[in-house]
Image (cartoon, rainbow, N blue to C red):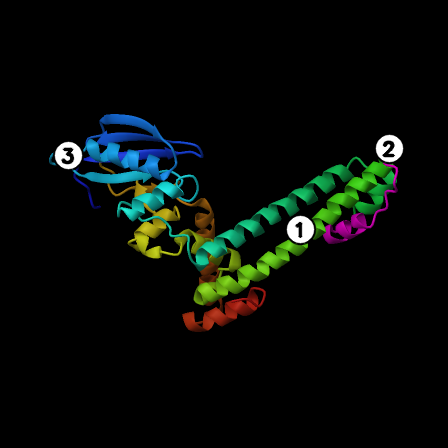
Amino acid sequence: MTRMLLRRDDVIVGVDTHKNEHAAVVLDGLGGKLAELTVAPTAEGFRQLLAAATGHVGPDGRLVAFGVEGTGSYGIGLARFLAGGKLATPKTADGSIESLRLLKIACDTAVKARTAAMIALKAVLVTAADELRAELESLTDHKLIQACAGLDSGADLAAPDAAMRHTLGSLARRWLQLHEEIKGHSRHLKVQTKALAPQLVEAVGVGLDVAAEMLVTAGDNLDRARSEAAFAKMCGACPIPAGSGRTNGRHRLYRGGNRQANAAHRAGCAGRRVLERLRRWAGLSAEAALPACGLIIGGRR
């Protein structure tokens, strides 16, 4: 493991970013606190922070690093400022993968809203009149949505039965609207993901969602992750020493990193395990197992 040797004259800065202000702490190379300050999230505030940091560097020291929270949200302005001074390498967020990230946000939030609409509809249906509940409860989800969307509540909603029909119809129509919206987002995601990483999409166990999540995690400038190990840490998929002292070779799972990318990584690993089991079961070579796996798992590769 590579170790960074620091001296007391060195300076490290940690920044807790917020919408209206950033709180920073300046430490020496041995962890001693040198200063605390709060700056505005503006170019002038960033210059003040950099000046404060460099002002505490000793005669034989250097400004080692900035640790910035939320470089993809509230900290993105500071990260870009530091990148301009060659002090950081944040995601550039200026290419096709940034477009993919924004499309994925639109799709993911629509999926959550659609799920919430279905949950709310079923919760409301529990309290419906016995006759209406008996008519609707046995239906599959899609047929339930279609039936509720066609309910006629009338103009007067003072009666509970009318209000019930109105609510069920409203939730069902919301679900249908979101369903159509999701299909549109999914089409755009499919086109962009296949264009950006066609080989990744073709891998066993890697669907469009998994591929898109891995691309978004990597960003437009993947070269900022200088090794496979660094990218594994970004995805929370790397082993780390079990203790801070002598570990005798013992390691544990890393619980940090991007948890969505971690879930996508696990899905890909599961697909590879399925392929290996099928290969053993059928007595196939690795090359022959791939199309066979595609035929068995829903016709997909």
Q: Which residue is mark 2?
A: 158
Judged from the image, the secondary structure of the residue bearing numbered disc 2 is loop
Q: Are marks 1 and 2 in contact (CB under 8 Å)?
A: no
Q: Earlier in the sequence, mark 1 or mark 2?
A: 2
Magenta segment: 140-159
Q: Which residue is mark 3?
A: 7
Image x and y of residue 287, in percent: 42, 72
Q: Earlier in the sequence, mark 1 or mark 3?
A: 3
Query: Residue pushed farthest bottom?
Result: 288
Q: Which residue is mark 1?
A: 178
Callout 1, which amino acid? Answer: Leu
Residue 148 part of the magenta segment: yes
Q: Residue at x 58, y 58 (%)?
A: 186
Where is residue 242, by image quadrant? Answer: top left
Left or right relative to 33: residue 131: right
Would you say residue 33 is visible in this rendering? Answer: yes
Image x and y of residue 229, in percent: 31, 51
Where is residue 16, by image quadrant? Answer: top left
Residue 157 part of the magenta segment: yes
Callout 2, which amino acid? Answer: Ala
Q: Residues within 10 Å of mark 3 (few under 14, many from 20)?
A: some
